[in-house]
Image (tube, rainbow, N blue to C red):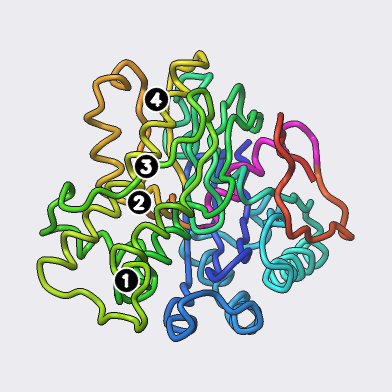
Amino acid sequence: MSIVILGIETSCDETAAAVVENGHLVRSNIVHSQIELHARWRGVVPEIASRSHTERILPIVEQALAAAGVTANDLTAVAVTHRPGMIGCLLVGMAAAKALAWRFGLPLLGVDHVQAHVHTGLLADPAMPLPALALVASGGHTAMYRITAPGQSERLGTTRDDAAGEALDKGAALLGLPYPGGPSIEQAALTGNRAAFDLPRTLLSADSLDFSFSGLKTALLYTLRPQGTAAPTAPPTGQRLADLAASYQEAVVDVLVTKIRRACERHAVRSLCIGGGVARNRRLRERLADDPRLRGLHLVLPNPTLCADNAAMIASLATVAWREGRTAPLDLDAVATPESGGKAKVRP
């Protein structure tokens, strides 16, 4: 009998709902982005995001069900992100999921947003050989995990300051590029020289699998505005802008690829997969596909729509919990922070 799960995701600024069958067949995946609402502030404003989720969540759910060709009576369970994220945003999605579960007598499943990104490789390629190394790189998180079984992973390293996506957003702001910064830098870098500016790659100690991007951001600031300069300088334009964007992006990608190599050398893995918004970056995908030290691994580069925040990954990971008989109570709490380091297992 098929397992058909409705997933709901509202941890940040995407209102999303999806229907996934048997953990990997995506029957619908609807995402409403709030980029236009937050662009003027160059970042997500929690109150505005929560209000938008409230207005959009039920129409998005209805759209996901219609696109999948199912009704509530066809569903096995309802899954929802309950951690980590902005509390107000999480509560909107959880209220909707709890109401739907109660109204239709369906089990409720709580899902960790970061672990759903970790699981994206198995959503895109259910036959991905395990154990696998998973990189999660987004605006709020940058970490590596070793996946030992569906729904089970161990964190190997995480960011000590800025996440990769946060560094790209802040770099774009310094360069005068529009929000969101990652796609803007990627576009500006297309005609740039990646070696034009010697920006630092912070790798920490020789055996560290942690990340640090704050020094790179500061280096870009001082490249644009040398120390001792009294007034801000005008944002770069033309070829200088392209070269700066390309050099900055390459520095971020260099750190990510180097850390992945280190992890693969230290931990026995058969596959490599990526998730999170930064995983959509074409230069990162190109570098991973062409890296001679990673060619022996089974590489999973999910469709970009599965890398950004979405509800298909929530429903997919929730299928693991359902198969193991683990459901959540209707008083499930929203939690702003991710689980601590070490072993993680999807659970309510």
Q: Which of marks 1 and 2 is nearer the N terminus?
A: 1
- Seen at 34% across and 68% down, the residue is 172
Instruction: Give the Cα distance between marks 1 and 2.
Output: 30 Å
Give coordinates of residue 42: x percent, y percent: 45, 77
Residue at 30% of width from left, 49% of height from top? Answer: 199
Residue occupied by mark 4: 261
What label does residue 280 carry, if any? Answer: 2
Q: Residue furthest front?
A: 228
Residue type indicated by callout 4: Arg
Q: Closer to the N terminus: mark 4 or mark 2?
A: 4
- The x, y position of residue 237, in whole percent, is 16, 75
Q: Which of 293 and 238 is in front in this view?
A: 238
Q: Is mark 2 on a helix, strand or loop?
A: helix
The answer to whether residue 317 is above or below residue 126 is below
Residues under numbered marks 4 and 3 in contact, where contact means CB atoms less than 8 Å apart: no
- State how far apart marks 4 and 1 are (Cα): 34 Å
On the image, numbered disc 1 is attached to which residue?
A: 225
